[in-house]
Amino acid sequence: MAGKKNSGPLHRRHILRAGLAGAGAAVSSGVVAADFVPAATQTPGKPMSTYGVPSPHEANVQRIVGAAYPVASPGTGSSRTPLHLLDGTITPAGLHFERHHNGIPDIDASTHRLLIHGLVTRALEFTVDELLRYPRTSRIAFIECAGNSGVNGAPQPPQTTAGAIHGLLSCSEWTGVKLGLLLDEAGIDSRAAWMIAEGSDAASLSRSIPLAQAREVGILALFQNGERLRPEQGYPLRLLMPGWEGNLNIKWLHRIKLTDGPVHARDETSKYSQLQPNGIARQFDLIMGAKSVIIRPSVGMTVPAAGFYEISGLAWSGHGRIAKVEVTMNGGQTWKEAELTGPVLPQATCRFRLPWEWDGKAALLQSRATDEKGNTQPTRAALMAQRAPGQIYHYNAIQSWQVMSDGAVRNVHV
Amino acid sequence: MAGKKNSGPLHRRHILRAGLAGAGAAVSSGVVAADFVPAATQTPGKPMSTYGVPSPHEANVQRIVGAAYPVASPGTGSSRTPLHLLDGTITPAGLHFERHHNGIPDIDASTHRLLIHGLVTRALEFTVDELLRYPRTSRIAFIECAGNSGVNGAPQPPQTTAGAIHGLLSCSEWTGVKLGLLLDEAGIDSRAAWMIAEGSDAASLSRSIPLAQAREVGILALFQNGERLRPEQGYPLRLLMPGWEGNLNIKWLHRIKLTDGPVHARDETSKYSQLQPNGIARQFDLIMGAKSVIIRPSVGMTVPAAGFYEISGLAWSGHGRIAKVEVTMNGGQTWKEAELTGPVLPQATCRFRLPWEWDGKAALLQSRATDEKGNTQPTRAALMAQRAPGQIYHYNAIQSWQVMSDGAVRNVHV
């Protein structure tokens, strides 16, 4: 297939001139429509249904469920979004990642209660129906587990898919009640500076959250991509703190207690704190950093031959909007700015795209995100220097994919 | 419950002063956390899964499948999105509306082909894998059947839910290949002015589309809300013409033929054309008009008592972005501009919200959308004057809901 000798971005004119390797097979000018009568036109199809499911031909598109969970607590673990099989920015609810510390509770919304108490003027208790009466807000936001991508901290990079490495990340449109509205209704005591949010699962997972920011950005989410929350994402109620550490977005939320300080719960001390080389742990590193990953191509995909491809991937930041994503095909010698699919929303995943003509030689692909606050995704070396060995949280380092001359893609540490 | 005497919009301060009828029950200041130990905390929960489904407690959230379909063709008919049970702007894929003319074909993507032929320089045939190699684009867009809301054309307004009346409307994030890229690759002959798009279902539904606009805005969609298209939305490939008549977005697309004129297919002549009172039918009314509907409250919901509520609903236009939505609680004597949940996107549904304090007396609620091109949603009387009796397509008239003094909501023609 004719093409430019050098790898690099393409102009549309070149795309048209070069065509794509193996795409758009020309057919005889004498072809008539009668030559193209698909079998499906000969058979009446299936009727309508009350709730649709994916095509059976897409049965391979599944969450990646982690292996080897404790027998005593089979619900402890995670499942990852198969990022490498998806596109766009919205994650379908059935593929939203999971991270549970003692499984998914079966909660009947009609018996669920939310208590707001502690340093308040008056404690309040809400049924779900009562919460559904309040004014609502909707927004698109990602949720990312603070442990996402941590497997890349291992000395040997895992040779596995983008979803298996980075799939504790999903993005949905959430709808619910602004937390601040209910906190103001309870009346915030002048001594209150933090709030403790607790779930009603068998782990009773709780986190301490700075109150002022919770009041400003927190949402009590009831809906996920238009319909009610899924059980594995917290049905009937979860806290949404857009851009904050994943487990702060407490699922199966039943209690909010206003306090004068953090309670130093398990999931912000023994876990989800960042041990540094000097032996001191960083605590309350609450916002997920600027991050990106190239998804096409990535491990498990083969680049068939020299020719034109589109590099694409996701970028996101807990600090706000993505400002730019730069991509290199030569391991950082030169960088090119990718196109961001609009609209670019704060604390939401953004799809980036860049044309690439591969010359058939080994290429080292990386993407580097910068958000609107000026935070730039660090190199792996820079990030690891700030961490104690084995430290895996908040891993937002640049992902490097080595495209081999035979078209295979490998995960590499650079 | 204390409240202002007059119905009208509320300020936040008033929301806090008045509280909500029946919401936020105060609890004793002596309550301790131990009084609130939900049963779910005592039982290890369910483990992770490969593809999630809604809570069994939400089993009532279903598409509304139309009744009485021909036995010979059980796949002919529709199912509607239950708008009254959802929120936000994204429709979950399992609840996206259906409209089929001979059922849903079971197509294996590996055997599916797309042919582009007719007045082109060279005819091209694509496999789905080949289409997946091209650069992609993503965008959020609604699809609305041209027959949506037509039941409101009946002399007696149907006393049924917002979903049953207006549910041939859904909104998703679509990802695919720009049609223009492939048309340019085939080479557009100077005589070509239209294109015929044809589906590979048992109805072989086809539509004629003006070529220049198809080349500019058309997308060959492969993904729906991040995952591959659902069978009932056209798996593996559909045409997306954002904002255009629903059935133009040909599902199970297998053929595009460039022509010098329209073919006047069945589904743009005997159906999907608008008969006017003078006996002449309007044809090729291709763009869906500016439209809105209040969803909360609507028929099937009861407004429990005088007090505060949030009126909310959806607005959309095939011409571009929604510019404003005005709401009246007194049948049009006074109008107030609602808040639009951002971002407001072109040819996408927009959620509008407005605080309302109901004084317990009969109230006539309406919403009126205006898009960025200046198109305003017409009154029912104005729209019906332009149509022959029984004419139901492109029904975008203002929806009126009468709230009775007992809190029941009725559909009324105004």
Image: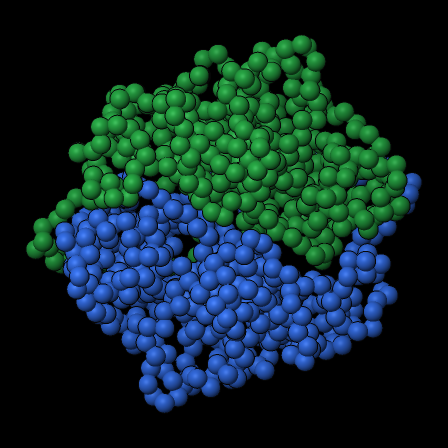
Chain colours: A blue, B green
Give the residue furthest to the front.
B334
Looking at the image, residue B412 sits to the left or right of residue A84; the answer is: left
User: x, y (%) of residue B4?
Assistant: 22, 32
Name the residue at 31% across, 31% down: B8
Q: Is residue B71 visible?
A: no
Looking at the image, residue B249 sits to the left or right of residue A323; the answer is: right
Name the residue at 46% across, 27% down: B164
Quarter in which the C terminus of chain B is drawn: top left
In the rendered view, tell whether residue B227 sits above or below residue A285. above
Give the residue furthest to the left.
B30
User: x, y (%) of residue A303?
Assistant: 71, 67
User: x, y (%) of residue B207?
Assistant: 72, 31
**Nearer to us in this view, A145 or A325:** A325
**Nearer to us in this view, B350 or A145:** B350
Count of picture labels: 0
Give the residue furthest to the bottom.
A278
Q: Quadrant of residue B208?
A: top right
Q: Is residue B22 visible?
A: yes
**Nearer to us in this view, A51 or A294:** A294
Looking at the image, residue A251 sits to the left or right of residue A298; the answer is: left
Name the residue at 14% across, 51% down: A122
User: x, y (%) of residue A206?
Assistant: 27, 64
In the rendered view, tell whether residue A85 sits above or below residue A264. above
In the rendered view, tell whether residue A168 sits above or below residue A113. below
Name the residue at 79% across, 27% down: B263
**Nearer to us in this view, B235 or B241:** B241
Quarter in which the N terminus of chain B is drawn: top left
Q: Quadrant of residue B17?
A: top left
